[in-house]
Image (tube, rainbow, N blue to C red):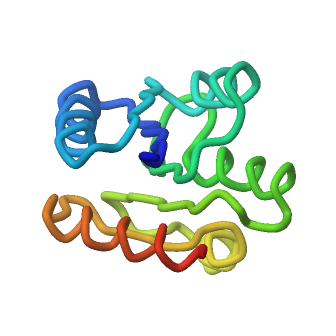
Amino acid sequence: MSKTVLIAEDDKDVRLMLYRMFSNHDYNVITAKDGRDAMRILREEGFPDLILADHNMPGLTGLELLQEVRKRDPDKAVKTILATATHMRTSDDVRAAIDHVDLMLAKPFDYDKLIQLVERLLQSEA
């Protein structure tokens, strides 16, 4: 059975590239155009196996999204990745990310390495 990945990314081109990449590696892929859209999807469809969220999104940031996921999934069944093109603004942001995120990635990232990291993360849940 293939794993499900939710991609929350406000950049349409990056979102499409990630969709294609994960689909080509036999993942079920759900995309969200921002954090609020991702929350709507989670309410309607339940939790995926992994969430990849862009940190800098309008309305609800990736970190805010993943903090909410952790509140609803305290056992950390959902693996989480936060992608950011900028440095975290404060040490509080970094501490919050560490508490709510399994992996942080700097953008731009190598897509092949991203797949390898995701596969390792998902295997570690067993």
Left or right side of 6 for 117: left
Q: Quadrant of residue 5?
A: top left
Left or right side of 12 for 90: right
Name the residue at 31% across, 58% down: 85
Name the residue at 66% across, 44% down: 65
Decide which of 77, 109 is in the foreground and name it. Answer: 77
Q: Quadrant of residue 21?
A: top left
Spot occupied by residue 2 in the image (x, y as percentages of width and height): 42, 46
Name the residue at 68% across, 31% down: 42
Residue most toward the front? 1
Quadrant position of the C terminus in the picture? bottom right
Q: Is residue 32 above or below residue 52?
A: above
Name the residue at 58% across, 33% down: 35
Spot occupied by residue 106 in the image (x, y as percentages of width and height): 30, 68
Q: Is residue 126 above or below residue 18?
A: below
Q: How many marks?
A: 0
Spot occupied by residue 64 in the image (x, y as percentages of width and height): 68, 48
Decide which of 4, 81 is in the foreground and name it. Answer: 4
Q: Is residue 73 above or below residue 21?
A: below
Spot occupied by residue 43 in the image (x, y as percentages of width and height): 76, 25
Left or right side of 30 for 113: left
Left or right side of 97 for 23: left
Q: Quadrant of residue 93?
A: bottom right
